[in-house]
Image (cartoon, grey):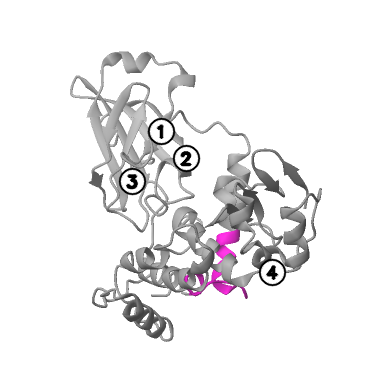
Amino acid sequence: MRITRAAVVEVGAWPHPERAALLEGRGAVLAWDVLGDAAPAARVHDVDRAADWLWEAYGDEAAAGVLGDAAGITPAGAWPAGRALAQLAWLEAWWPASGAAGVPALDLSVLRAERAVATSAVEHLLDDEDATGRALAAVPADPVVAGLSDRLAALAEDYGVVLPAPVASRAEFALAAGGDAAGDGTGADGVTVHSGADPVDWALVPAGAVDAAADARWAVVRRGGATFLDVAVPGGPRPGVPLAARFGAVEVALDGTDGLGRRTGRTPVPATVLLLPPAARRLTVYAPGFAPPAAPDRDPDAPSRRAAIIAYARTRPDAPDATLTERLAGRR
């Protein structure tokens, strides 16, 4: 792994944010590429603090090279404890649950419980001294999973945290990704003047807020002498996340839900919307308070990168190195 040295010591190639499983330790941040099996990349901003634990990630000789003046290193081997916590952080931030693509939803109680246990295993090197307590406080309920529940209860007792009562597990969610009887699910009761579909930028919505593999559909409709914008996007396993969409200068709240589980919205628009050139007819779905409605993602690599992540996620429930959260995906 190549090392570059400036204000920050950088080890290896930093993965794209959608592929980066992160662990923030004292003096350094590590990033595993979820689509690769290599050692983590690192950004070391405080060599003295990172010296206490970097050997756990890379081995003694390689860590000495990072902390010294080596131009490159060969890591000694895997670091399961750190990798597990980073993977769980990635699952919560980026897991592409999709009925359309066959990616099952994760059980948040299992994920948060497993993350609390994984945090405790490496808390000695984390930048946040209260990381385990915070992770325990984020557990929504005892997941009632053999082994995990016992470890969680013992950890909560050690930290003086009272866990919420167990809740019934939910069944695997399913989404209908196709259209309705009208064809595209929008403009069914008017004259559709323009319509289209745009992918949802994963960076603008929390994981699970929408189906990660399905497009958002829009239609400009003439109805009763007025013009409306109709929007529909397949929902995900987190239906409570507020969503909105922007089309040109028009904003619409996606505060409805149709019979197919899609998040929907309708708003009146000026007739000038009918005159928008094709290049301006782009829909941006976002979660207010989570991310601003940035311009539509024009990254040419995004479709292939996200397709690869979805393909990876489909394999994870049966992968030999899967976390418990991944193994139980869609099965509770």
Position of 12 relative to 221 (above/below): below
- Residue topped by disc 3: 181
Q: What label does residue 78 carry, if any?
A: 4
Image location of residue 191, percent across then percent down: 29, 27
Q: Where is residue 278 in the image (x, y as percent from the top left)?
A: 47, 20
Q: Give the structural element (helix, strand or loop) at label 2.
A: loop
Q: First in sequence: mark 3 or mark 4?
A: 4
List x then y, in percent, for residue 311. Answer: 60, 58
Circle number at residue 201: 2
Q: Mark 1 points at which residue?
A: 284
Tell whether label 3 touches label 2 (CB within 8 Å). no
- Label 2–label 1 contact, CB within 8 A: yes
Residue 20 vs residue 121, the one in the foreground: 121
Query: Closer to the observer: label 4 or label 1?
Result: 4
At a point 30% along the width and 46% down the height, the residue shown is 263
Is tag 2's residue or tag 3's residue first in the polypeptide sequence?
A: 3
Viewer-side residue, 174 vs 251:
251
Please give the range of residues in magenta.
312-327
Visible in this render: residue 107?
no
Q: Disc 1 marks which amino acid?
A: Thr
Q: In this view, does 116 lie above or below 64?
A: below
Secondary structure under tag 4 reads loop
Contact? badges 4 and 1 (CB < 8 Å): no
Label 3 crowd bin: few (<14), some (14–19), many (20+), radius 10 Å = few
Q: How far apart are marks 2 and 3 (CA)?
A: 27 Å
Q: In this view, does 57 lie to the left or right of 179?
A: right
Q: Earlier in the sequence, mark 1 or mark 3?
A: 3
Callout in the foreground (1, 3)? 1
